Image (tube, rainbow, N blue to C red):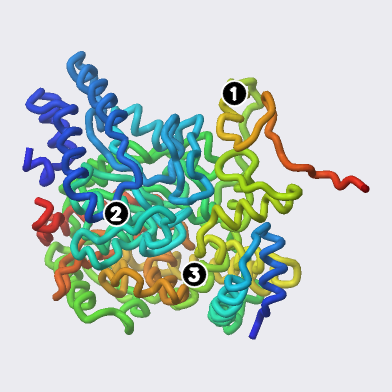
């Protein structure tokens, strides 16, 4: 069973299909690992052991009766942000504690249709607002590579659990970098697909024009497998792109001869740690050795992306989070009238960062300030988007670091929201432009902390990113699981 | 300084948030720093630039108006903190003169 952590989902599925292992054995193995290691990491908010074993038994009987499914019998960890029928879904917030959704998100439905096993709910920043998972109202997740450091965020639980081998793979969400940044800081593969590629139906909303769902996995092949399950049109999400998704597995093993890689000069100027810079240069050289060519490009408006993003995402969040009013679900605090009840409920139910963003978002949308902030930001967003359109005229894919630094220490940026926001300086422009972005492990720094390479693709061109990432992964062997968790 | 404590309190009221006095203090300081940073956008000339609300435009999506199953009443009120029968129960909404 020890080799399982080194295997791809396709390989594990073969073992299950040949009945060399059962899903119950596989699930028990991961539940055992969670028991042993998660006390130190705190990746899971809740482990659904019995539910997982019931799903595993069902998978085993389906396998016995000859059924197939791309994830049949495969244990996954789920970020606690997807409505999952009958399973408490909290978004790591006190205001949703005890919320049992009466329906499945489309993504959960698709995982179920392929026969996955639900190991548990993974920790995150409350309502996905944060870059370190320290904003969870339940627990602080630690980075498996160094327990004194943050795993990144907001999908920190998903990345940490995947890196420590506490699930086969996981899913996360990415609004400004929330899949790619934790994947990078934990040394695993993370994909944020094109906006609209994966249905958001049943995903608890943070910033609706930016939120996107994607997989966090230990290898590129698993990323392709997961994308094959979750991508594609869904009539339940009006922003879902009405186009069929290609077979992402078909991109694995194709060479990258002639691929034109864009290197944005503004991203390599300063502020990057020297080890990050070193690995970036080595990664670009690797792509060139594999037959790709590089071209310098310019994304001049990217320096305004963080300011633009925090206007747009807080505006959208203040509107989306209006639904937590103590009436339909979740927490209620008694009040003397309805307004008083709303205020007390929201005071008690939301954490610091969520309140900060609601206030900021309400302010930038309020009468008299709308034009100066929200409208201005929406226009700058156009400029940022056009930079990418222009850049993609001379290249097929863009390469940058995911994060200017490796994992920082717990508490380091909690008192300074702006410093925390700037953690996502390289990932945010991608969300504003709606493009697909991917984090691929490319090395460790001198402290032994993972560094991630970001691939940015043209709209709907995830297949080409998977193709390039697979070539890269084959050539650049990076440890995926820290020694002590093997 | 862009905003003072009164503005933060007023905006918190609009966002239906009660705040402790020390939170008003803290948020006022932090939001001023953040808004100052956001003001860097003013250096950009955006005259004539169309705003983007969605990066990947999907034009108005319509579906046929067909009768379909929806959530049952039981499921819909399952999570209500307080309910009466099949209704959500809320505190008094209309003011009554005494």
Can you give x and y, in whole percent of width and height, for residue A51 in the image? 31, 29
Q: Toward which corner of the image does residue A86 lie, by quadrant?
A: top left
Which residue is tagged 3?
A: A384
Q: Residues within 10 Å of mark 1 (few under 14, many from 20)?
A: few
Image: A180 above or below A201? below
Q: Residue furthest front?
A: B98
Image: B19 above or below A136? below
Question: Closer to the camera, A381 or A406?
Answer: A406
Q: Residues within 10 Å of mark 3 (few under 14, many from 20)?
A: many
Which residue is tagged 1?
A: B74
Can you give x and y, in whole percent of width and height, for residue A73 in the image? 22, 29
The answer to whether residue A150 of the structure is visible from this angle is yes
Instruction: Name the residue at 26% across, 64% down.
Output: A185
**From mark 3 to mark 2, how far is it between C-alphas?**
23 Å
A145 to the left or right of A403: left
Question: Badge 3 sits on which subunit?
Answer: A
Q: Residues within 10 Å of mark 2 (few under 14, many from 20)?
A: many
């Amino acid at each position: 069973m020890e080799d399982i952590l080194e295997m791809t989902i396709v390989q594990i599925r073969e073992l299950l299909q040949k009945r060399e292992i059962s899903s119950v054995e596989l699930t028990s193995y991961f539940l055992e690992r969670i028991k042993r290691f998660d006390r130190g990491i705190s990746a899971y908010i809740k482990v659904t052991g019995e539910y997982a074993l019931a799903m595993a038994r069902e998978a085993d009987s389906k396998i016995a009766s000859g059924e197939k499914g791309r994830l049949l019998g495969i244990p996954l960890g789920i970020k606690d942000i997807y409505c999952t029928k009958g399973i408490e879904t909290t978004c790591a917030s006190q205001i949703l504690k005890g919320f049992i959704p009466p329906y499945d998100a489309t993504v959960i439905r698709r995982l179920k249709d392929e026969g996955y096993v639900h190991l548990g709910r993974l920790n995150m920043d409350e309502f996905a607002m944060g870059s370190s998972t320290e904003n969870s109202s339940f627990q602080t997740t630690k980075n498996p590579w160094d327990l004194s450091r943050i795993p990144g965020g907001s999908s920190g639980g998903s990345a940490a659990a995947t890196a420590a081998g506490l699930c086969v793979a996981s899913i996360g969400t990415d609004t400004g970098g929330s899949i790619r940044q934790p994947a990078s800081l934990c040394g695993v593969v993370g994909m944020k697909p094109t906006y609209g590629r994966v249905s958001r139906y049943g995903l608890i909303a943070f910033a609706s024009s930016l939120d996107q769902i994607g997989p966090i996995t230990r290898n590129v092949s698993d990323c392709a497998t997961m994308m094959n399950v979750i991508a594609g049109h869904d009539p339940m999400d009006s922003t879902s792109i009405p186009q069929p998704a290609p077979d992402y597995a078909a991109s694995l093993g194709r060479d990258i001869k002639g691929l034109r890689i864009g290197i944005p000069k503004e991203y390599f100027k300063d502020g990057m740690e020297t080890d990050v810079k070193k690995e970036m240069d080595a990664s670009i050289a690797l792509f060139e050795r594999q037959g790709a060519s590089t071209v310098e490009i310019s994304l001049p408006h990217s320096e305004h992306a963080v300011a633009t993003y925090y206007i747009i995402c807080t505006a959208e969040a203040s509107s989306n989070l209006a639904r937590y009013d103590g009436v339909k679900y979740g927490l209620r605090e008694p009040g003397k009238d309805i307004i008083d009840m709303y205020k007390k409920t929201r005071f008690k139910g939301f954490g610091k960062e969520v309140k900060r963003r609601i206030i900021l978002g309400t302010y930038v949308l309020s009468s008299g300030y709308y034009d100066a902030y929200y409208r201005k930001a929406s226009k700058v967003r156009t400029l940022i988007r056009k930079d990418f359109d222009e850049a993609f005229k001379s290249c097929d894919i863009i390469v940058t670091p995911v994060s200017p630094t490796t994992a920082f220490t717990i508490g380091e940026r909690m008192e300074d929201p702006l410093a925390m926001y700037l953690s996502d300086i390289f990932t945010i422009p991608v969300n504003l432009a709606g493009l697909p972005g991917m984090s691929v492990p490319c090395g460790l720094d001198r402290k032994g902390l993972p560094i991630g390479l970001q691939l940015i693709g043209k709209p709907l061109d995830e297949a080409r990113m998977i193709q390039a990432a697979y070539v890269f992964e084959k050539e650049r062997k990076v440890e995926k699981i820290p020694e002590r968790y093997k | 300084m862009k905003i003072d404590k009164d503005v933060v309190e007023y905006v918190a009221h609009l966002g239906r948030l009660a705040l402790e006095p020390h939170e008003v203090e803290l948020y006022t300081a932090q939001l001023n720093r953040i808004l100052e940073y956001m003001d860097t956008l003013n250096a950009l000339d955006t005259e004539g630039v169309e705003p983007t609300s969605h990066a990947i435009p999907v034009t108005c999506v319509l579906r046929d108006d067909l009768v379909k199953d929806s959530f049952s009443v039981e499921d819909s009120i399952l999570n209500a903190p307080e309910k009466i029968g099949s209704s959500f129960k809320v505190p008094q909404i209309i003011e009554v003169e005494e």
